[in-house]
Amino acid sequence: MNIRAALKREERKLEEQLRKLQNQLNGVQAAAKALGGSVSRELAGVKKRVLSAAARAKISKATKARWAKYRNEKAKKAKN
């Protein structure tokens, strides 16, 4: 198998995908420009998700438990 030829084929495929995506991006940008500033205002209004304190604590506790388990298993392997 000629690796160089395979890489060239893959490069051509990726360049074609890039060309298609660039065309799509240009279309979206043109549509946004035609609509005016309304698109940017809508995107700016998206709010960030916020976790409650209880949810953050639950995630923290689970993470600490996972790391403790990992460290214990690692210590057991080191002893053997």
Image (cartoon, helix red, strand yellow):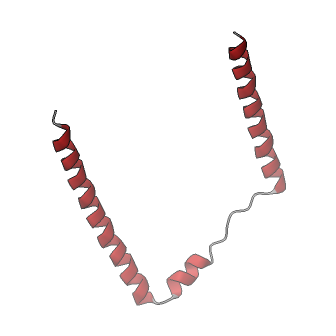
In which quadrant will I find the C terminus? top right
Q: Residue at x 68, y 15 (%)?
A: 77
Question: Looking at the image, is 13 positioned above or below residue 3?
Answer: below
**Left or right of residue 24: residue 57:** right
Q: Quadrant of residue 26?
A: bottom left
Question: Looking at the image, is 20 positioned above or below residue 51?
Answer: below
Q: Position of residue 17 (x, y in %)?
A: 28, 59
Question: Looking at the image, is 74 positioned above or below residue 18?
Answer: above
Q: Residue at x 83, y 51 (%)?
A: 54
Of residues 75 and 47, which is closer to you in this image?
A: 75
Number of numbered discs: 0
Of residues 33 and 13, which is closer to you in this image?
A: 13
In which quadrant will I find the N terminus? top left
**Left or right of residue 21: residue 41:** right
Q: Residue at x 32, y 69 (%)?
A: 22
**Left or right of residue 27: residue 47:** right
Q: Residue at x 34, y 77 (%)?
A: 27
Of residues 68 and 52, which is closer to you in this image?
A: 68
Q: Position of residue 37 (x, y in %)?
A: 51, 88
